[in-house]
Image (cartoon, grey):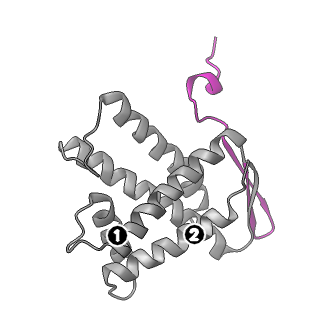
Amino acid sequence: MFDDPATTDPYAGAVTWDRAGDARIAVLYPPYVPLVRTHLNGLRALVERQLTEPAVPAADPRVVLLVERMRETSAEPQLEPEVLADVRTRLDWALSVLPEHGGVLELHTPMHQWWWGRALLDVCTAITALLGAWLRGEAVDGQHCPDDATWWMWMAQMRWLDAQFVEPLKPS
């Protein structure tokens, strides 16, 4: 007998993608909208804190990795505040188009698709940095990883965000 994926993977079936011309349409299972919103808001708050209270150099590993990755993909050299301002703009936009209670997310243009995928990739990058710091025994925001189950929960969420939002929107 096969296991029902919905009972073995708590994130299974949360997002379904479709196309309508150039548009990409995501149907989100309502209980996962708050999870996505929490991740977007959490990174938004971290970026805003770094922009308003800059540490020289940035000490938070999530900010450091985010800035490094953005600089790798930028055509022109950018300073940390410029990179973080771009990230904040994307996160604000992603939060503005995320449905309040589930339902349909419509990304009408390739640019909208890129912005949405990039905003979620930014979240995945920040989680990757968090997980790496915890593996090295470092505290992030004064918190060490409480236990293995918490580390794996964050890893599962990062993989889910990547699989459900980043990968489907990568250009072919």
Specify the quadrant of the image occupied by residue 32: top right
Label 2 – label 1 distance at C-alpha: 16 Å
Crowd band around label 1 with a 10 angstrom C-alpha radius: few (<14), some (14–19), many (20+): some
Magenta part of the protein: which range? Answer: 1-27
Q: Say how many tags the image has.
A: 2
Residue 51 at x, y percent in the picture:
37, 75
In this view, the residue in front, 137 or 42, is 42
Q: Amino acid at mark 2?
A: Asp
Residue 40 at x, y percent in the picture:
53, 57
For residue 50, which numbered disc appears in the image? 1
Please tell me whether mark 2 sits on a helix, a strand or a loop: helix
For residue 92, which numbered disc appears in the image? 2
In this view, the residue in front, 105 or 31, is 31
Residue 36 can be seen, yes or no: yes
Please tell me whether mark 1 sits on a helix, a strand or a loop: helix
Crowd band around label 2 with a 10 angstrom C-alpha radius: few (<14), some (14–19), many (20+): some
User: In the rendered image of this protein, does residue 169 appear above or below residue 6?
Assistant: below
- Specify which label sits upstream in the sequence, 2 or 1: 1
Residue 172 can be seen, yes or no: no
Residue 148 at x, y percent in the picture:
31, 29
| Residue 165 painted magenta | no
Please tell me which residue is depicted at 66% across the width and 40% down the height of the picture.
14
User: In the rendered image of this protein, does residue 146 appear above or below residue 17?
Assistant: above
